[in-house]
Image (spheres, rainbow, N blue to C red):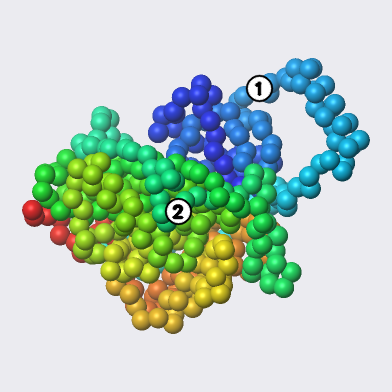
Amino acid sequence: MAEGLTKCRSLNGKQPNLRERPIWIDSRHAFAVQIRRSNCSGAGRMYGMGECERRGSGTRNLPIPGKKPVKKPLHSLGTKLLASLWLMANPARVRPSATPLQIAHPAPPTRDPNTSGYVKAAELPDGTNPPPAVDGNFIIGPTHNSATPQPSGPLAGNVVEFTMDSSQSKIYPGIAREPHTFGTVAPADPAQLVVTTSHPAPYSRKVAVYIPAQYLPGMVMPFIVGGDGPDRHLFSVLDTLITHHKLPAMVAISIGNGGGDAQGSERGLEYDTMSGTYAEFVETEVLPLVEAQAHVKLTKDPNARAAMGYSSSGACALSMAWYHPELYRRVLTYSGTFINQQWPYNPQTPHGAWEFHEHLIPNSPARPIRIWMEVGDRDLLNPNVMRDGMHDWVLANENMARVLAAKDYHYQFVFARNAVHVDRGVVEQTLAEALQYLWQDYPTVQVK
């Protein structure tokens, strides 16, 4: 997720119903934007509608439709007035602030999937999905209804959760960017962002593990691992598909991010870095804990492992398979951040994840990776101060489809009409089909 989309807190302070539609506050605009069940790319949880807190803009309690504004007490206003007068009288004692985040940006335009330069794609009837066994490019219509019935009762499988602290990690000890700051474009290179407000900082992350009802002690299980967790919608869809024998029984591991977003943040470091580091983190620090805490055995077969994610964690899923094809060979992404968002700067991949479609895939032998990916017609465009021509999510995903086809990859690309970044409705409509496409060549029965 790009910088600016932030979480909301439930009005009653309790964890909201996971089936409620979350509200995100977009600090690039001056209004509340409801993203259809964004699977929490950037925050790691779904939040119910309620009192919103904007990270990055410093503005709190924006008006939300249906909620009356709360009048400020007079003593609060008086305190603010005195503080303002003190700052005016003592300018030398005020520390200069770092570059503030820009707030006012136009909403992304609606892109036409038939634009010149985009890949040719098959237009599907509204409300339908591509066949789960067919490669290629597809356009889905503007109506996005869930393709998987919502379970009326508990899952057939089991979910185990635990927390990881940054003090436990040798790979990611933790960083954070100062609130209300972002960075400045390097004078000599518009593709580089200079961030001076990032520093070491602790964090904790939740890890949720779905264990199918078919699991028996001693079975070695295939699995899918995803970022920006816990992703309970994924668990629900998997549970239904496995129960109806449309997917092999598998474990799902949904890992929370380390916090923040984009350059200079822990989340950005984990997901936007072009390397195999995150896959190594999962392999050496997360999976051993999963096996110990959830009492499961996980396969070492790369063909029986998948990685998935939303926005930056989607780009990270591809990095996991690209840099470690001996570990992962199936990738699923929504609104993949295949753009220039890597930080710190790396001269070997100077354009961050834009390098995937600019150089890496075109100039490398095809890897044994199967990919499913999606982008929305109103996906992100230039959401921050950088104007390097490499911050268009639609163009980036279109470029990905083109280079994957040229290299004869098994891939399916979905262009969604009437869809924003990590669109909730699109996820509900397509996730079941995407998972079936991803696992179509894997046997549905496992042996001990």
* SS class, disc 2: loop
Indicate which disc, 2 or 1, sits on the residue closer to the N terminus.
Answer: 1
Q: How many marks?
A: 2
Residue positioned 27% across, 37% down in the render:
159
Which residue was labeled with disc 1?
68
Q: Position of residue 410 (x, y in %)?
A: 31, 70
Q: Residues within 10 Å of mark 1 (few under 14, many from 20)?
A: few
Q: Residue furthest right?
A: 89
Name the residue rendered at 66%, 33% in the picture: 60
Observer-nearest of 167 and 101: 167
The reply, left or right, for residue 154 in relation to residue 73 is left
Compute the Cα span from label 2 to label 1: 43 Å
Residue 424 shows up from this direction: no
Q: Amino acid at mark 1?
A: Lys
Mark identifier at residue 216: none
Instruction: Label 1: state its secondary structure.
Output: loop
* Residue at the extreme top of the image, as rendered: 74
Q: Residue at x 82, y 21 (%)?
A: 78
For this orientation, the residue located farthest to the left is 448
Q: Provide the residue designation for mark 2.
A: 172
**Quarter occupied by residue 308:** bottom left
- Side of 360 where 252 appears, left or right: left
Residue 48 in the image: x percent, y percent? Answer: 49, 31
Q: Amino acid at mark 2?
A: Tyr
Q: Nearer the viewer, residue 230 or 392?
A: 230
Relative to the observer, which residue lies in front, 234 or 322? 322
- Residue depicted at 67% across the width and 45% down the height: 180
Q: Nearer the viewer, residue 116 or 4?
A: 4
Residue 160: where, in percent of width, then height?
28, 38
Say if 403 sits above or below 228 in the image: below
